[in-house]
């Protein structure tokens, strides 16, 4: 087995529907448990709803996820983060599987730092037993997501080791994927599987979720980095509208015969600053009071955005 001590990066071409790509990086970083963290409280679905992020927008697989009821971000008790919107969801799995508490020290906690537009959410699982693994196994890990960059990480803490003690079905699941809301279609995926020291990275857009065959050594950091800047990720499908900026605002036109479009304007950090429905040609959207800089006007159906530079 190879023990990673330096960054290993591979450019991944992922996804159906022209989704953005990610790079996968593996390194070793000293694991320090979270301080000043909040204990999770899970509902009957084993979710803890993080309402502190309501009103914020995160970019995942090049798509905007505007958070807020009924689509507040959630932490899942069995080891994952989940982001929902109309029509789809993104799941970030750390060491996800059926978990059992080892003892009273088995906890799930989270910490939110930063400010709107640049929040960092870290969720930490401490001392959990993988129910399908051998007796005595345990692990701790942390998932982190950065709003400003879109970077997600899985950082492995103390664990029972033991080499390759799992198989594709019994081991923990690790990676990030985008699916439709009914989970009948996988839209994009970056999945880490097999040998945790030298994992295979699977980017085929399907639901073939093979597991890690062991625990990554303590300090192992798996990093998922968007290859396009957050908030200005390119997509390939043609725009379903045109837009240009003038002194009186942002002019939006739909092609003849085009359906009504639900549009939202996001800034370069992925924050939604305006949302509207356009169902006629020649609509003018107000821009007074908006911050200067690059913005994207996006259709909610996922077609290509129009880049707008506000003065």
Image (cartoon, rainbow, N blue to C red):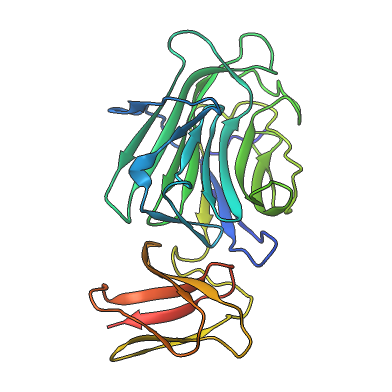
Residue 231: image location, x then y, percent: 44, 66
Please tell me which residue lies in front, 161 or 294.
294
The image quadrant of residue 239 is bottom right
- Left or right of residue 128: residue 249: left
Residue that sits furthest to the left in the current view: 289
> Vertically, is 87 above or below 126?
below
Please tell me which residue lies in front, 223 or 1.
223
Residue 139: image location, x then y, percent: 54, 21
- Can residue 211 be seen? yes
The image quadrant of residue 286 is bottom left
- Left or right of residue 117: residue 299: right
- Left or right of residue 7: residue 236: right
- Can residue 267 be seen? no
> Vertically, is 166 above or below 231?
above
Which residue appears at 31% of the width and 76% of the height?
293
Please tell me which residue lies in front, 34 or 30.
34
Quarter in which the C terminus is drawn: bottom left
């Amino acid at each position: 087995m190879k023990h990673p001590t330096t960054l290993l990066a591979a450019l991944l071409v992922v996804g159906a529907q022209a989704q953005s790509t990610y790079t996968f990086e593996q390194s070793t970083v000293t694991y320090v448990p979270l301080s000043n963290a909040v204990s999770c409280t899970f509902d009957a679905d084993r979710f803890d709803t993080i309402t502190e992020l309501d009103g914020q927008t995160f970019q995942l697989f090049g798509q905007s996820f505007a958070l807020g009821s009924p689509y507040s971000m959630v932490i899942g008790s069995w080891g994952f983060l989940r982001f929902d919107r109309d029509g789809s969801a993104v799941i970030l799995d750390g060491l996800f599987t059926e978990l059992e508490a080892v003892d009273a020290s088995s906890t799930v906690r989270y910490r939110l730092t930063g400010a709107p537009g640049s929040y960092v959410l870290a969720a930490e699982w401490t001392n959990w037993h993988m129910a399908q693994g051998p007796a005595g196994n345990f692990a701790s890990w942390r998932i982190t997501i950065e709003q400003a960059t879109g970077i997600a990480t899985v950082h492995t803490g103390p664990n029972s080791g033991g080499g390759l003690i799992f198989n594709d079905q019994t081991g923990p699941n690790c990676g990030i994927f985008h699916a439709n809301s009914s989970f009948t279609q996988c839209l994009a995926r970056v999945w880490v599987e097999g040998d945790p020291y030298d994992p295979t990275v699977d980017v085929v857009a399907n639901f073939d979720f093979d597991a890690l065959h062991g625990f990554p050594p303590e300090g192992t950091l798996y990093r998922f980095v968007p290859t396009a800047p957050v908030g200005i990720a390119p997509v390939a499908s043609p725009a379903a509208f045109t837009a240009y900026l003038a002194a009186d605002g942002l002019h939006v036109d739909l092609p003849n015969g085009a359906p009504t479009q639900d549009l939202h304007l996001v800034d370069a950090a992925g924050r939604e600053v305006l949302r509207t429905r356009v169902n006629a040609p020649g609509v003018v959207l107000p821009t007074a009071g908006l911050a200067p800089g690059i913005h994207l006007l996006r259709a909610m159906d996922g077609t290509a955005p129009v880049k707008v530079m506000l003065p």
